[in-house]
Amino acid sequence: MKILDWYILKRFLVTFVFTILTITIIAVVIDTSEKTDDFVKSGLTSIQIIKQYYFGFVPFIISMIFPLIVFIAVIFFTSKLAAKSEIIAMLANGVNFNRLLRPYLAGGVLLGIVLWLANQYVIPRANEIRSDFQLKVIDKNSSYQAGMNNSNFYYLRVDTNIFVGIRYYDTSLKSAGGFFMQKIRDNQVYYNLRSESIKWDTATKNWKLENAFERKINGLHEEIRQIPVMHVNLKVKPNELRKDEYLKDKLITPDLDQFIKMEELRGAEGLNTLKVERYRRDATPFSVIILTIIGVAVAARKTRGGSGLPLAFGIVTAALFVVMDKFSTVFSTKGELNPMLAAWFPNIIFACVAFFMYRNAEK
């Protein structure tokens, strides 16, 4: 790293930090104004609201706008350098475009690594804080209830040949009614278990059935017996029997990987939403590097009007990136688009744009 590299890298990072702090403060002010009534009704103090909500909200907002802020920061300070003819002076002294791009790539890789680590472990913890507050305070009067699933019936596969269904599962009491379990072999049911109620037993770490009926089928022969109390191991824990709209955002990546594997084994639906979230955690940091290259290619040329035109281009490009990302997500969760392709599609398109602009800027 030469003096020139440190000079550009310092300007890059300082501009990025200033921009993201400014945008974050604006977002917090807007969010506070929208939720003032909810905060007042909650009866919490300002310190409690900050700890229980904004400690999660601020990292969440930063993670959302991180790549776009990097892009805007690159355009902003690079266009300033170009307007003051500093880039012309660098090129006149034998610094080619590839050499000029080196400190930008170093900054982009550094920020990309920071975002990648945050996406895997930090942001999910922040989302847990934010979503818990959202459920307890903001959404408590809405139709969504944290204590009871919206769906009256819960059906899942706990093993390759074991299927379970329950009704009216209460996550707070860890109990449900209308339980049944079926074991299937060669596409035929050979075991059936039903119970009026099922509850998680914290002492034995398994499920307790009351007034259960066990039915074993062997060809034309059937054996039925009633069992007042029995315990079964369903390979399912209480925290897995929940329909939490924020769950994919709250799980750290290792837990999310494990949850996806378990849901695939159980034959659950709607897995594309979880998979898109998982792949996006890796794809988003790469967008930081791609947008950095585009930003340098756009803003390195001196134009009339200063940085106004490059900034306008940056805002339009950022909007296109967000729209493309949202469309690919919808096509995956509601359609048949591959989740990995949905997460990486904006990066693929903008990588082609970055290569085209890089070749033109190099000339």
Image (cartoon, rainbow, N blue to C red):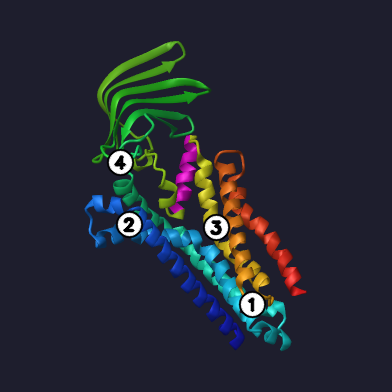
Q: Residue at x 49, y 24 (%)?
A: 185
Residue 153 x/y as whole percent = 39, 28
In this view, the residue farthest toward the front is 305
Residue 133 x/y as whole percent = 32, 51
CA gap, disc 3 and disc 4? 36 Å
The residue labelled by disc 1 is: 102
Q: Which amino acid does label 4 sit on?
A: Asn
**Which is nearer the N-term, disc 2 or disc 3?**
2
The residue labelled by disc 2 is: 53
Residue 322 sits in quarter: bottom right
CA gap, disc 1 and disc 2? 39 Å
Task: Work out whether 256 lies above or below 80.
Answer: above
Q: What stretch is highlighted in magenta?
A: 254-266
**Which is nearer the N-term, disc 3 or disc 1?**
1
Relative to the observer, which residue lies in front, 93 or 82? Answer: 82
The residue labelled by disc 3 is: 282
Relative to the observer, which residue lies in front, 250 or 226? Answer: 250
Residue 45 appears in the rendering: yes
CA gap, disc 4 and disc 2? 18 Å
